[in-house]
Amino acid sequence: MSRQAEKPLNDGPIIHKEKIIASKMIRIYCKKKHHKKELCEECRNLNEYVMKRLSYCKFGEEKTACAKCPIHCYTPVYRQKIKGVMRFSGPWMLLYHPLESIRHIPMPEKLKRPLSR
Ligand SMILES: [Zn+2]
């Protein structure tokens, strides 16, 4: 086991929040798609992978949404998987956790303004 010790693991508030959002999205996906109460093995595996990638993210607290990141640190297999999860859970996130979705899903300008008569 060799460890790249050049940089400590990310542990800031941005990374922490990203982890929570990713976990929620994977949970929604598994619940609706795989009809499991707890994460199934495949989704648990994906969740662990995503947590690890966030911990090692090169940008740390400076990171943008992963979809916009120029690096794409995911392997193709996991990238496909997480893409599927994001696509599936995105609309559910808007419903369940609208504030947390704003960073990840582009919102039309007029939705951001409060309604006026
Ligand atoms: Zn699952």
Image (spheres, rainbow, N blue to C red):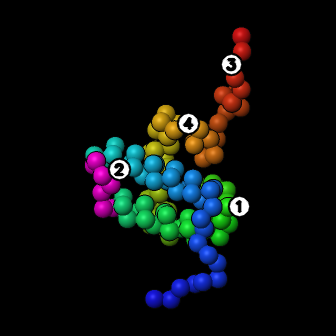
* Rendered image quadrant of residue 39: bottom left
Label 4 to label 3, Cα distance in Å? Answer: 17 Å
Label 2 to label 4, Cα distance in Å? Answer: 20 Å
Compare residues 69 and 102 and report the one nearer the observer: 102
Q: Residue at x 68, y 66 (%)?
A: 59
Instruction: Judge: label 4 CB < 8 Å from ligand 1.
Output: no
Name the kind of residue labelled 4 in the image: Pro
- Can I make out residue 72 in this image? no
Q: Which residue is mark 4?
A: 98
How dense is the environment of label 1, judged by Cα within 10 Å: few (below 14), some, or many (20 and up)?
A: few
How dense is the environment of label 3, judged by Cα within 10 Å: few (below 14), some, or many (20 and up)?
A: few
Label 1: element kind: helix
Q: Which region shows up in magenta?
A: 36-42
Q: Which residue is mark 3?
A: 115
Of callouts 1 and 3, which one flags the residue occurring earlier in the amino acid sequence?
Answer: 1
Instruction: Judge: label 3 CB < 8 Å from ligand 1.
Output: no
Residue 35 magenta-highlighted: no
Image marks 3 and 2: residues in contact by CB distance under 8 Å: no
Q: Which residue is mark 2?
A: 30
Q: Which residue is mark 1?
A: 62
